[in-house]
Image (cartoon, rainbow, N blue to C red):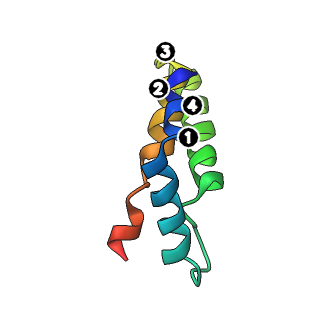
Amino acid sequence: MERVNNILNNKLYKIYLDKNMEAEEGRRFCHHDMGHFLDVARLAMIFNLQQGLFVPEELIYAAALLHDIGRWKQY
């Protein structure tokens, strides 16, 4: 999964992931961290299979990794 590895190894991605963690330090629920991103990917994979959408696994994981990466700006 080249796209996923490129995202995970991207310097800005790591910085923004840290910014999410800092912004949500006192938050009780739903941290936008790697656990959340992987949960979203797993749910999307289940939906993809159940609905017969045939979206490539790599695309689902890449989208899940990126879907909330800028959440720190909201705070």
The image quarter containing residue 1 is top right
Q: CA distance from mark 3 to mark 2?
A: 11 Å
| Residue appearing at x 54%, y 22% in the figure | 2
Q: CA distance from mark 1 to mark 3?
A: 24 Å
Q: Are marks 4 and 2 in contact (CB under 8 Å)?
A: no
Q: Secondary structure at mark 3?
A: loop
Q: Are marks 1 and 3 in contact (CB under 8 Å)?
A: no
| Residue appearing at x 66%, y 53% in the figure | 35
Q: Secondary structure at mark 2?
A: helix
Q: Are marks 3 and 4 in contact (CB under 8 Å)?
A: no
Q: Which mark is residue 59?
A: 2
**Residue placed furthest toward the bottom:** 26
Q: Amino acid at mark 1?
A: Leu
Q: Is residue 44 above or below residue 35?
A: above
Where is mark 4, residue-wise?
5
Q: Earlier in the sequence, mark 1 or mark 3?
A: 1
Q: Position of residue 15 (x, y in %)?
A: 48, 58
Q: CA distance from mark 3 to mark 4?
A: 21 Å
Q: Dot 1: few (<14), some (14–19), or many (≥20) neighbours within 10 Å?
A: some
Q: Position of residue 4 (x, y in %)?
A: 54, 31
Q: Amino acid at mark 2?
A: Leu
Q: Earlier in the sequence, mark 3 or mark 4?
A: 4
Q: Is residue 3 left or right of residue 70?
A: right
Q: CA distance from mark 2 to mark 1?
A: 14 Å
Q: How many marks?
A: 4
Where is mark 1, residue-wise?
8
Where is mark 3, residue-wise?
54
The image quarter containing residue 68 is bottom left
User: Which mark is in front, 2 or 1?
Assistant: 1
Q: Are marks 4 and 1 in contact (CB under 8 Å)?
A: yes
